[in-house]
Image: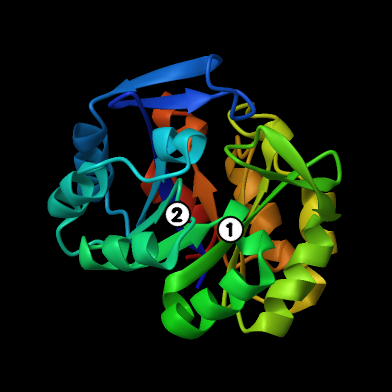
């Protein structure tokens, strides 16, 4: 079943969409993140995608954010990312109500990756954030010396169960998903959630047909380009 997951990105206590993940390039103001999460739950979301942007930039999760979103989400599972670079932080997220924890920068450490995969199983999602052919880390402020496809293969070999693949150049742009990037990663054999640039129902259909497990949708839902119900129906979820 193809999953459409609404994004709730939070910076300085407010919901925002950033252009290419750049901190000072806010493209949409979404107001209170708790209210936005409540809206998506009311519209029938089956999962929420929470990104702690402050945590991503600072290297450690923000205090209390996940707990507030998990409380309003009630029975809707929440996958959270942003600053989760230690096993202790991941454990705390699970204890605070996260159904899945997304790890990006820390995933480049083979020892950490293996320990996290063993410890979390299905609850671990490795965020493969790609910019200009290489993986972007530390809040997308630095490029690592490894490609998205190489990191995906490493994850598959290490026992990771799921990837979130984001084309950072398209994030917040409504320019359409990077199908070439996804086609390079999918041969690793792991389930892949796609993110970055999704602007239309046709984009969701293309991701479904390509073989992605689901998609994280932000700006298009925030702007009302289509509804969550329309997205789910279009993708055949």
Q: Verify CB contact (< 8 Å) between mark 1 and mark 2.
A: yes
Q: Which residue is mark 2?
A: 84
Image quadrant assignment for residue 171: top right
Up/down of 99 relative to 169, above or below: below
**Residue 207 rendering spot, x and y as whole percentages:** 67, 56
Q: Quadrant of residue 213?
A: bottom right
In percent of width and height, residue 95 lies at 22, 67
Q: Determine crowd level at label 2: few under 14, some 14-19, many 20+ residues with C-alpha closer than 10 A.
A: many
Mark 1 and mark 2: span between their CA atoms? 8 Å
Asked if 223 appears above or below 237 in the picture, the reply is: above
Q: Nearer the viewer, residue 186 or 206?
A: 186
| In the depicted structure, whether residue 169 falls above or below residue 137 | above
For residue 88, say whether it is visible. Answer: yes
Q: Position of residue 14 (x, y in %)?
A: 30, 24
Q: Secondary structure at mark 2?
A: loop
Picture residue at 31% right of the left edge, 54% below the top: 45
For mark 1, does the 10 Å Cα neighbourhood hold few (<14), some (14 to 19), or many (20 or more) residues?
many
Q: Counting residues from the N terminus, which is met first, the one under dot 1 or under dot 2?
A: 2
Q: Is residue 31 left or right of residue 106?
A: left
Tag count:
2
Q: Residue at x 45, y 46 (%)?
A: 82
Is residue 226 visible from the viewing direction of this image?
no
Classify mark 1: helix, strand or loop. Answer: helix
**Which color scheme did the rendering employ for the protein?**
rainbow
Residue lying at 63% horizontally and 41% vertically, measured from the top left: 196
Q: Is residue 161 above or below residue 129?
A: below
Kindly identify which residue carries mark 1.
106
Q: Position of residue 180 (x, y in %)?
A: 85, 51
């Amino acid at each position: 079943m193809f999953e459409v997951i609404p994004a709730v990105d939070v910076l300085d206590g407010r919901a925002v969409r950033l252009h290419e993940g750049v901190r000072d390039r806010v493209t949409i103001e979404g107001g209170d993140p708790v209210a936005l999460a409540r809206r998506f739950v009311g519209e029938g979301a089956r999962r929420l995608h929470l990104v702690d942007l402050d945590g991503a930039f600072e290297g450690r999760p923000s205090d209390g954010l996940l707990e507030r979103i998990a409380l309003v989400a009630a029975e809707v599972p929440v996958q959270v990312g942003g600053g989760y670079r230690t096993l202790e932080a991941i454990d705390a997220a699970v204890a605070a109500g996260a159904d899945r924890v997304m790890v990006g920068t820390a995933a480049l450490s083979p020892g950490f990756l293996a320990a996290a995969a063993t410890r979390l199983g299905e609850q671990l999602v490795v965020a493969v954030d790609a910019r200009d052919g290489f993986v972007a880390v530390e809040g997308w402020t630095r490029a690592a010396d490894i490609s998205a496809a190489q990191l995906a293969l490493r994850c598959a070999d290490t026992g990771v169960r799921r990837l979130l693949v984001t084309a950072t150049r398209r994030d917040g742009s409504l320019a359409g998903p990077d199908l070439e990037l996804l086609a390079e990663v999918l041969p690793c054999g792991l389930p892949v959630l796609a993110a970055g640039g999704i602007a239309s129902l046709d984009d969701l259909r293309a991701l479904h047909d390509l073989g992605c497990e689901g998609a994280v949708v932000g700006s298009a839902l925030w702007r009302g380009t289509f509804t969550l119900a329309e997205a789910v129906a279009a993708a055949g979820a």
